[in-house]
Each structure stands twice: as C-alpha cells, then as structure tokens.
Amino acid sequence: MLIFDITTSLDGFVAGPNPSLEDPLGQGGMQLHDWATSTRAWRERHGLEGGEDNADSELIAEGLARQGALIMGRRMFSGGSGPWENDPNRDGWWGDDPPFRNPVFVLTHHARDRVEFENDTTFNFITAGFEAALEQAQAAAGEKDVLIAGGAETIQQYLAAGLIDEFEIHVAPMLLGSGTPLFGGAGAERPHVELTRALSSPGAAHLRYRVIK
Amino acid sequence: MLIFDITTSLDGFVAGPNPSLEDPLGQGGMQLHDWATSTRAWRERHGLEGGEDNADSELIAEGLARQGALIMGRRMFSGGSGPWENDPNRDGWWGDDPPFRNPVFVLTHHARDRVEFENDTTFNFITAGFEAALEQAQAAAGEKDVLIAGGAETIQQYLAAGLIDEFEIHVAPMLLGSGTPLFGGAGAERPHVELTRALSSPGAAHLRYRVIK
C-alpha cells in the first residue's frame, strides 16, 4: 500500500509561516510534533533515550513497523525551501544517523549518487518522476508499505494522481493561523475518502482514512 | 458555557465555493452534513420522520440538550451573503418552524422587532454588538449553554475575543478544495486548546476541545 502519515494543526497546516534553514517547519511548526517527539518510540528511532510509553508511542511504533520504503520531496530532504535545496553537495538535513532505516527515494531534478548509512537508511535520488519513484519504492518495500514522508506538495502530487491507498492525519491541538496547508486547495484533484478510525490520545487526534477508488 | 459545534470538511471548510441563495452552503457544502441529516435526532428536531438511530444520532441529541440559547450572524439568519442579507422585511432562511426551539440572538446592524414562533424559537435582533448579544443569550440560557450557531465569521469573532469555553468539530470525510474556512487565518487571535474527546462514527470524526484560558 501507498500511505502517508502526517501531523497538522487544527487549522490544517503541516508547517507554520516563515520557514528557514534554522527553522524548517516555520513558526510554531516544531510544536506540532510534541505529541510524537515526547514518546519512547519516536525517541528510540531518533537515537534518543527515554520518552513516554503511552498510546501515542504505540501508534508510532505501529506506523514504523509498516514502513518498507519512503518517498520524499527534495525540500524535505534538504531542509526546507531555500538556495540550498538544489545544492548537489549538500547531504541533506538528516545528519549521520537518519531516522528512516529503510530505502528513501528523493524526488529531485538533480541526479546524484545513492548515499548509504550504517543504519540501513539509503537516499536514492530519482529524476525520472514521481511514478518512477513509486515503482522503485514498491520494489524495495516488498510486502511492506511505502510511506510518502512529505512534504505537503509531494503528498498532494500522489493524491492528485489517485495513487494513495490510505492515510493518517494526526491533528495537534493548536492553531497556526498560516503556513503550509496539507491539502492542495482549489483546482486540485480531490479523492473520495472513508474514515476508518479515530483515536484520541494525550497529544493529538489520530484520524485514519481509506481512499475510495 | 459558551460553545460552538460545527461540521467541516477534512480540509477545514464549513461551506463550499460559490454560495448562493439557492445553495447557501456552496458547492458540496450540503454533503458535509450528511452524517447529521441522516440521523433520527436531527430529523426529529427538523420536524421530519425516520432517520438512523446510531452513535451520530446520540451525539446530536446530547448537543441539543445542552443548548439554552443560540447566537448567529446575520448571514446565517438570512440565508448566506447577498443583496437580501440586510433586508429588514425578510423573515430569514428558517421557515415557519425554525429548528432552534430556544431564543436565538441575531447579530445585525438593523434593528428589528423580535419574532416569535410556537415552537419556542424566538429571533432577537441585536445591534449593540457581539458582547451584548452574549450577555442577553447567557441570561436567556440560564444553566444551559449558549451555542454560537455560526457562521464562521461569527465563531471567529467570539474565539478572537477569548469568549469560547469549549467547541466540537465534526470532520466530514470529504475534501471541498475551497470555500469558507472555519478558522480565521493569519493575524487572527489564536486560542490555546486542549483535546478532550475524539470519537469516530459512521459519518464523521468528532473532535471536542476545551479552550485554555
């Protein structure tokens, strides 16, 4: 299955206003993820100790176990929009121990050699388009799911093409006022969806949808 | 308590694009409310037979039981934006048996005599501002809640003034792409909120929030 799994504010933004290299999620955007970053499952995946063992942590562990490969846009790889986003020498935003531990397929216009890490993360740069990226990601994922990691434009591209099977939105209890909306707005192809699960947990409402094809 | 209770699309709109007198909720906007209009509780309140006895119906009955008075903007009273919205002779959108059965306080710039119906609905036209309307509504509601019935601008006005205590958003499983957003966007005063309940039911996710003051 092709899925995405993303946190939005209650007013529907995945990042706040004025993103920068220092603050790629924009003003207030980091706080969206407090529900996740406080959990043991998220912290473990990011090489950190401690964290809460709660319903949110279980939800994250469950999501991580489904992933066999990931797809991301070039801005998510490089750390947001800016003059660096097409720099072929930039190793991305994710440091020496990227938290993906699976093959990651980066949509880009700039061919680059594959980058490998000891923790099983690989970055594979795909210049042949989003459908080609999906084919390669599905081959890499095997029986597991392919996750569109983001950003919003990349998710919108796959949604508009009717390729998404299922998605989960974690609605953080905060309003950002402006920023990057998850959904594409007027003119975008809009999928028909069915709510399959709604959970509340200490830090967010978790809404899972199936795309009706 | 001062509350609101409203249905949005998954992309955050309370009405679709191009509202008109014939179609005050805009394109696709009526479908947002399918989860409610199919229930016995909603139909009974609107003088209709039948309907589903399900979790959504219980939720609606519970919401109706809390209401002691309502506040609405002039466009919600008159049936959307248009040349008719300030017509002092127009009796509003709601027919001879309005579904409120409580005192309704309509925010307007045009003084009008109070209108009474046999079913206990009264329309009271308030020209002294939204805070005056709240005082009168609270006096009328007694121990019960005052519900901001809408539209979005009226809700935003009370939210920005820090007057809302609690709200529930019913997220319908559909995307509208454009229309009237529930929240006010950039520049609006943004409340701090806490998720107190999330339910899923056949037709919508129901998210209840408390405003942290």
Image (spheres, coloured by chain):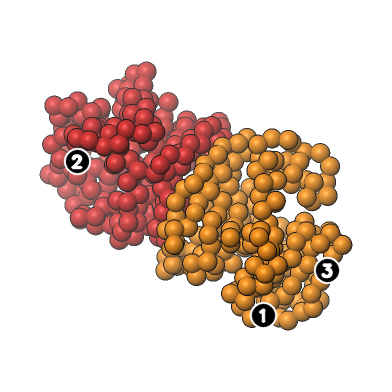
Chain colours: A red, B orange
> Which residue does the numbered mark 1 point to in the structure image?
B127
* Discs 2 and 3 lie in a common subunit: no
Q: Is residue A104 above or below residue A18?
A: above
Instruction: Please state which amino acid type lies under the numbered disc 3.
Output: Glu
Give percent across and percent down for residue B108: 67, 76
Return the residue nearer the eye: A108 or A71.
Answer: A71
Return the residue nearer the eye: A172 or B64.
Answer: B64
> Which residue does the numbered mark 3 point to in the structure image?
B116
Quadrant of the rendered image containing residue A163: top left
Q: Do the residues under discs 1 and 2 have CB atoms within 8 angstroms? A: no
Residues packed near mark 2 inside 10 Å, few (<14), some (14 to 19) or many (20 plus):
few
Regarding residue A157, the answer to whether it shows in the image is: no
Regarding residue B58, the answer to whether it shows in the image is: yes
Return the residue nearer the eye: B49 or A81.
Answer: B49
SS at mark 3 in the image: strand
Q: Which of pointers 2 and 3 indicates the residue nearer the eye?
A: 3
Alpha-carbon span between mark 2 and mark 3: 65 Å
Q: Chain of mark 1?
A: B
* Discs 1 and 3 lie in a common subunit: yes
| Left or right: B142, with A89 as reference point | right
Mark seen at residue A94: 2
| Left or right: A155, with B91 as reference point | left
Quadrant of the rendered image containing residue A6: top left
Instruction: Please state which amino acid type lies under the numbered disc 2.
Output: Trp
Q: Chain of mark 3?
A: B
SS at mark 2 in the image: loop
Residues packed near mark 3 inside 10 Å, few (<14), some (14 to 19) or many (20 plus):
few
Quarter of the picture holding the C terminus of chain B: bottom left
Give percent across and percent down for residue B208: 53, 48
Q: Is residue A56 above or below residue B157?
A: above
Alpha-carbon span between mark 1 and mark 3: 18 Å
Q: At 36% from the left edge and 21% from the top edge, which residue is drawn? A: A144
